[in-house]
Amino acid sequence: MDKKLAEWFAGNDTGLSSEALALFLAAGVPSQRTPSDSGDFGRCFRLLKHMGWESRIGEAAAASGQWAALVEIWPAITAAYEAEDHPGVYRLIKSVEADGYERDGYKVDRREDGSMRSAVGPKGFGGKIDLGNGVSMGFGR
C-alpha cells in the first residue's frame, strides 16, 4: 500500500465514505458508501487533497450509482463546502440521493419535493426508513 495512503488510513480524519473513496481510487474496490453530510464530505475533500487526487474524483462515478450522482454535482458541493455553507452542502447531497439509489437498482419512494423518503434494495429487503426531522435508519444488507 502507498505509504501516504496508509498514513491517512491510520489517522483520525477518516469515515466510511472517505474510506470507500480511498479504496476505490487506490484499488478499484466499489462501494455505495457516500458522504451524507458536510462532515462526511469534508473528510472526502481532505482525502483528495492529501493524496493529490482532486482531478480523479470523476473516476468515483464508476464505484456506484450513488457515487455517480454525487460526482455530477461535486463542483457545486465543493464550492458550498469551501464557502462554509454546511446546510448548502447537506441540501446538495440530499438533492441527488434518490437518483443515486435508483441508479443502483433500489425502488425509491420520494417525497413531494423529490427527496428520498425510503428505498428498498434490489434484492428486496434492505434500505432506509424515514424517521422524520431529517433522520433516517438503514437496515438489511
Image (cartoon, rainbow, N blue to C red):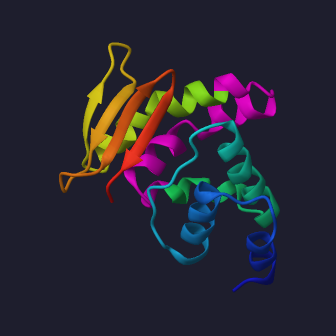
* Left or right for 33, reference 76: left
Q: Give whichever of 132, 116 is nearer the camera.
A: 132
- The answer to which image quadrant residue 114 occupies is top left
- Find the magenta span and give its range: 61-88
> What predominant SS class does the magenta segment belong to?
helix
| Relative height, residue 11 to residue 107 (above, below) | below
Quadrant containing the N terminus in the rendered view: bottom right
- What's the residue at 71%, 61% (across, down)? 53
The residue lying furthest to the left in this view is: 124
Q: Nearer the viewer, residue 75 or 121?
A: 121
- Residue at the image position 74 percent from the left and 33 percent from the top: 81
Q: How many marks?
A: 0
- Location of residue 2 by image quarter: bottom right
Residue that protrudes farthest toward the top in the picture = 112
- The percent coordinates of residue 27 (x first, y second) are 55, 77
Q: Where in the figure is residue 71, as x and y percent of width and height?
A: 53, 45
- The answer to whether residue 19 is above or below residue 35 is below
Q: Can you say whether 51 is above or below 99 in the image?
A: below
